C-alpha cells in the first residue's frame, strides 16, 4: 500500500485507521524527549508546603493541689466531714456514693488509718466494711483491742472509680483535711493500712513491703504501717507479715 499524503485522507479518523493498518503502536518525534526529567522539573518548581507545628496545651490537673488550704477554722471531725461534703470541685466526690472518712471516738489513743474506701465502704459510708471489717476486728482482738475503742479514718474519703489508686492531685487536695483530723484526734499510736498514708504524711517509702514494720514519727504520734485487710483477703500468705506487725504494735500499747 502506498503512503498517502494528508490530503488523501478525508478525516483524522481515516488517518488513524491507516496508521493502525500499518502497525503503528506509538507516535514518536524526530528528537527523543526525557519525560522523567520534565516531571522532576515540575515537582521541584513547586515550593514545599510549610508545616505549622502547634504545641499542645498543657494538661490541666483534674484537681488543684491544695497543700495550703486553710483548715484552721475546722474545730471538730464533724466540721471536717461537712467541709468535705461541700468540696464539689473534687472529682472523686462526683462518682462516689458516700463519704467514708471517720468513725469512732474523736479522741482515741489508737487510730486506724486506711488509704481509701473500696466498694463496700463506698456503699456503706464506713472506713471499713464487709469482710475487711470482720478481718480488722479479728486482727485488733488478737492484740487486745476492740473496734469500738479505736478511731477509724481514711486518708482519701471517696472511692476512686474502678478501685484504682488515687492520683497525686486527688491526694494533695484532701491532705490538709486529713492532717487537721489527726490534729483533733490526737492519737498516741497510729496503725496505717497500706503504704499510702505514711508515704504522703511522713514521706515514707512508697512500697508497703519496705515500709511495713518500721515506726515513723507523725507529730506527737508514732505510726506503724502494715498490709490492708483487703490485701490480706486477696493474698492470705501475707498474713504472717501482718501478724509480725501487730505484735510490734502491741509492744507499744
Image (cartoon, grey):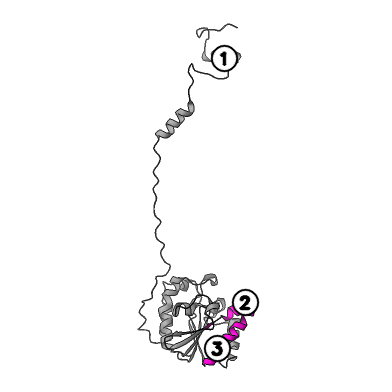
Q: Are marks 1 and 3 in contact (CB under 8 Å)?
A: no
Q: Is residue 207 visible?
A: yes
Quarter-of-image position of residue 177: bottom left
Of the residues tagged 1 and 2, which is closer to the observer? 2
Q: Position of residue 212 (x, y in %)?
A: 54, 81
* Residue positioned 59% across, 16% down in the render: 20
Q: Position of residue 223 (x, y in %)?
A: 48, 85
Of the residues tagged 3 and 2, which is closer to the observer? 3
Residue 120 appears left or right of 178 = right
Q: In this picture, which residue range is highlighted in magenta? A: 225-253
Q: Nearer the N terminus, badge 1 or badge 3?
A: 1
Q: Which residue is nearer to you in this view: 247 or 167?
A: 247
Residue 222 appears left or right of 145 = left
Residue for badge 1: 19
Residue 35 appears left or right of 20 = left
Please give the label number shown on residue 176. Answer: none
Tell me if residue 251 is in the magenta stretch.
yes
Q: Nearer the N terminus, badge 3 or badge 2?
A: 2
Q: Nearer the N terminus, badge 1 or badge 2?
A: 1
Residue for badge 2: 234
Q: Are marks 3 and 2 in contact (CB under 8 Å)?
A: no
- From mark 1 to mark 2, how far is it between C-alphas? 89 Å
Q: Position of residue 100 (x, y in %)?
A: 50, 80
* Residue positioned 46% across, 28% down in the render: 37
- Residue most extreme to the right: 237
Please give the label number shown on residue 248. Answer: 3
Q: How many marks?
A: 3
* Label 3 Cα neighbours within 10 Å, binned few <14 / some 14-19 / many ≥20: some
Amino acid at each position: 500500500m502506498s503512503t498517502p499524503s494528508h490530503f488523501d485522507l478525508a478525516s483524522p479518523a481515516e488517518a488513524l485507521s491507516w496508521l493502525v493498518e500499518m502497525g503503528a503502536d506509538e507516535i514518536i518525534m524526530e528528537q527523543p524527549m526525557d519525560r522523567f526529567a520534565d516531571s522532576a522539573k515540575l515537582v521541584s518548581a513547586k515550593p514545599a508546603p510549610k508545616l505549622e507545628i502547634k504545641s499542645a496545651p498543657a494538661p490541666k490537673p483534674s484537681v488543684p493541689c491544695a497543700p495550703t488550704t486553710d483548715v484552721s477554722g475546722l474545730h471538730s471531725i464533724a466540721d471536717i466531714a461537712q467541709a468535705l461534703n461541700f468540696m464539689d470541685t473534687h472529682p472523686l466526690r462526683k462518682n462516689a456514693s458516700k463519704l467514708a472518712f471517720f468513725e469512732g471516738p474523736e479522741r482515741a489513743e489508737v487510730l486506724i488509718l486506711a488509704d481509701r474506701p473500696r466498694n463496700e465502704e463506698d456503699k456503706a459510708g464506713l472506713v471499713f466494711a464487709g469482710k475487711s471489717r470482720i478481718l480488722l476486728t479479728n486482727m485488733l482482738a488478737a492484740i487486745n483491742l476492740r473496734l469500738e475503742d479505736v478511731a477509724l479514718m481514711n486518708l482519701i474519703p471517696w472511692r476512686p472509680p474502678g478501685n484504682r489508686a488515687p492520683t497525686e492531685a486527688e491526694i494533695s487536695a484532701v491532705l490538709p483535711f486529713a492532717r487537721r483530723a489527726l490534729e483533733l484526734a490526737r492519737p498516741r499510736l497510729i496503725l496505717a493500712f497500706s503504704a499510702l498514708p505514711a508515704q504522703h504524711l511522713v514521706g515514707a517509702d512508697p512500697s508497703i513491703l519496705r515500709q511495713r514494720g518500721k515506726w515513723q514519727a507523725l507529730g506527737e504520734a508514732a505510726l506503724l504501717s502494715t498490709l490492708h485487710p483487703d490485701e490480706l483477703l486477696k493474698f492470705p500468705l501475707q498474713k504472717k507479715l501482718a501478724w509480725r506487725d501487730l505484735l510490734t504494735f502491741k509492744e507499744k500499747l
